[in-house]
Image (spheres, rainbow, N blue to C red):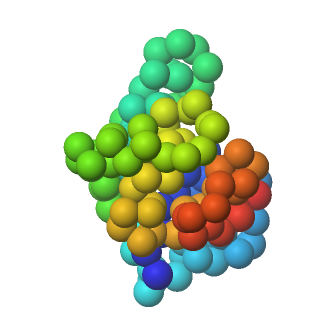
Amino acid sequence: MNLLLDTHVFLWWDRRETTLNADARAAIEDPRNDVFISAASMWEIAIKRRLGKLTFHGSASSAIGANGFHELPIVPIDAEDAGNLAWHHNDPFDRLLVAQAMRLGLVLLTADRSIRSFDGVALLPAG
């Protein structure tokens, strides 16, 4: 299975927080699964760090490889699809993650109820 971690799930995993539920943790740990982190999450982390809304020590992008995950770049079709989603959720990061998950057939791990209310993307509740 190919997984895409929502930003908060990536942070929980990297910080070894217990907030992550057992099913999500097992899916991430399963060596048969490929785990992806979107450039959108790196953008979100950088912005929130700059605004003082988030603490992250070191390089978030370096943490992708350190955790054995794969980088997922944003390509133009992701931005276009995110903008065209028939979904009344204004967070641009969430919209990009949903668009990427849909385009690539990834299972999105999230605890965000707004995302979980969206039909059309494979989800695994994470918290």
Number of numbered tags placed on the structure image: 0
The one of 85 and 6 positioned closer to us in this rendering: 85
Q: Residue at x 62, y 37 (%)?
A: 89
User: In the rendered image, which quarter is residue 8 located in?
Assistant: top right
From this viewpoint, which residue is outermost toward the left? 76
User: In the rendered image, which quarter is residue 88 located in?
Assistant: top right
Q: Residue at x 32, y 42 (%)?
A: 80
Q: Picture coordinates of residue 100 (x, y %)?
A: 39, 56
* As drawn, 121 above or below 59: below
From this viewpoint, which residue is outermost toward the top? 51
User: In the rendered image, which quarter is residue 2 located in?
Assistant: bottom left
The one of 59 and 8 positioned closer to us in this rendering: 8
* As drawn, 107 above or below 89: below
Q: Picture coordinates of residue 33 (x, y %)?
A: 45, 80
**Can the viewer see residue 6 in this picture?**
yes
* As drawn, 92 above or below 98: above
